[in-house]
Image (cartoon, grey):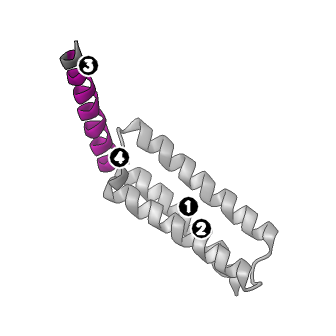
Amino acid sequence: MVSRIAIIAFSSSLGLCAASGAMAERVAGHPRINEVNQRVTNQEHRTAEGTAHGQINRWQAMRDGRRDARVERQLHRDEAMHDGHITMREQAHLNRELDRNSIHIDDQRH
């Protein structure tokens, strides 16, 4: 009886290790996704920096945050449709949106 419990516990712990390995692999992401995520992070940082220096007020920062959130939602939808990847066309569309957002942030800061 003890050996069955030990075997079950061991096999379940192996399953958890395999699942965590798959999750760690998933976090790395696809290069196109990583690029979009990095751009969103950079823009969030620029907005926060502008707010800290008084160049952007809180309403502008909230609007910029909503724009970035819209891009992230679209990224997650596109990613879900393609098993964790996005197409080059989807990436181009997201980059155009981020370009527009970047121009807005730049205009607000100067």
Nearer-N-terminus badge (4/2): 4
Vertically, is 27 above or below 22?
Answer: below
Cα separation between marks 3 and 1: 55 Å
Report the residue marked by disc 1. Answer: 97
The residue lying toward the viewer, choosing from 87 and 12, is 12
Report the residue marked by disc 4. Answer: 85
Give yes or no for contact between labels 1 and 4 (Cβ–Cβ under 8 Å): no
- Residue type pointed to by label 4: His
Is 80 inside the magenta-drawn segment?
A: no
Cα separation between marks 4 and 2: 23 Å
The location of residue 109, given as percent across then percent down, is 70, 83
- Residue type pointed to by label 2: Arg
User: Which quarter of the rendered picture does the C terminus lie within?
Assistant: bottom right
Farthest-out residue, top? 1
Residue found at x 49% / y 49%: 75
Image quadrant in which you'd find residue 104: bottom right
Secondary structure of residue under mark 1: helix
Q: Given this view, does label 4 or label 3 mark the residue nearer the observer?
A: 3
Give yes or no for contact between labels 1 and 2 (Cβ–Cβ under 8 Å): yes
Structural crowding at the residue carrying mark 1, measured as other residues with C-alpha within 10 Å and reported as few (<14), some (14–19) or many (≥20): some
